[in-house]
Image: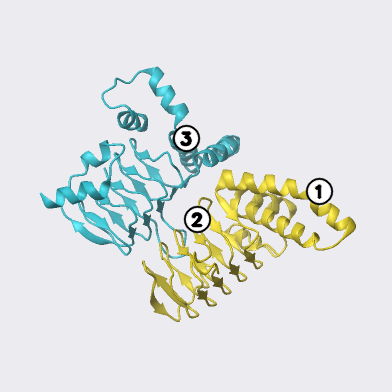
Amino acid sequence: MDIEIAHRRSWPGRPMTLMSCTRLLLSSPELRLLLIHRIVHWLHEKRKASNRYQWFWLALLILIEPTKWATQVCAKSIICTSCEIEGGVYFSDQGHIVFGAQKTGAGTVIGPRVTVGINLTDRGTPAIGRSVWIGSDCVIYGSISIGDGATLLPGTVLTRSIPAGVVMQGNPAQLVLRNFDNTELRALYDVDAMQHVAIKRRV
Amino acid sequence: MIRVHQITIGDRQAETLSLIDVLRVLWQNYGLQALVIYRFGRWLNHMRTYRYVRRGIAVSLYPLYSILAAGIRKAYGINLDQSADIAPGLYIGHFGGIDVRDCRIGPRCNIHHQVKLGPDETTGRGPIIGEGVWIGAHTRICAAVVVEDGATIGAGAVVVQDIPHHCVVLGNPGRIAQREFDNGAFL
């Protein structure tokens, strides 16, 4: 799940114990936000599915609302209630993320100050594939789909669908590289993405 | 003064607002809270121009304002500076990284998160923004430019030139992508 990938990123090669997991959960506001989001999302689904006990789920939702508000302010980021997130997604702890994607696959890493989906009248929200790396300051909007294993370098503004395994950069976004393997990029904590991609490009 | 009507959700957009509605909107909408405190500060500044009693009230309430404004800056990252001149009907979409200084904003504008509206570093004069302008997320307008009525500035744009009315601006550096665009549906 989410805590696993965060653990691997913070302390590579260290076994997961109850102690270290608790420490991670206490120190990382984004993990708490994700946890609360999963609970709220689950309650919403339950409320939609049941027709007799709607009031019960609504009461639980109202109960959890102050906690949600506190975590949002603490993490300085918002995750929309309606978006579906698979297990094992990493959000950057620096915050300022506004996240409203339709679907997000497992293994995706999202940097700070990222905006996904803009609430306009006629446009949909993006669907993000598995193991995508999204750098800081990215903006993604419109009803588009991002393929598995794509990489968005910092500062990209993306409005079109992209296939799997490409690297995009710039405003408006342009193709930099195809068939790029971003496993290393996703595993490392502090890495200069531009440099990393430039080295791969030369090889 | 502050646009509450449009924020109330969808089909329940009634002409009259009950107190409950207003309170719920205030609870949910972070930008509105910041705007209320900004207006409070402006009101205090206005009161300070008088003498005796009204000046006394303003001076005594000023610490309260600075505490509230600092709280908003810390918690939400919305910095509406007193040097900005904001007309009625501003709507702030999300919180985080909003910095508005030394500029003039017309009525019925929309601002989203990570928007920087600031003065030019060399001249020290800020942008002037007209009526009904939609400013998308991650936009940066840090120059003495004029954005005229009804312009739409797309997400992630960096505006460096004057924008005529009803235009769409995209990209970095911002270029005009479309003219005569009606942004009534966004506002």
Per the image, the residue denoted by label 1 is: B60
Mark 2 — residue? Answer: B113
Q: Hey, what amino acid is under mark 2? A: His
The yellow one among the chains is B
| Disc 1 with disc 2 on a shared chain | yes
Q: Return the x and y of residue B94 as percentages of the image width and height.
A: 53, 53
Spatial separation of the CA atoms under disc 2 and disc 3: 20 Å
Is A51 placed left or right of A14 in the picture? right
Mark 1–mark 2 contact, CB under 8 Å? no
Using the image, name the chain to which the residue with label 2 belongs.
Answer: B
Kindly state the secondary structure of the residue where label 2 is placed: loop
Q: Amino acid at mark 1?
A: Ser
Q: Amino acid at mark 3?
A: Pro
Classed neighbour count for the residue bearing mark 1: other residues with Cα under 10 Å, few (<14), some (14–19), many (≥20): few
The residue identified by callout 3 is A29
**Number of residue marks:** 3
Looking at this view, name the residue that lies furthest to the front: B122
Furthest residue in direction left, as rendered: A203
Residue at 63% x, 53% y is: B34
Q: Chain of mark 3?
A: A
SS state under label 3: helix
Please indicate, yes or no, whether residue B15 appears anywhere in the rendered image. Answer: yes
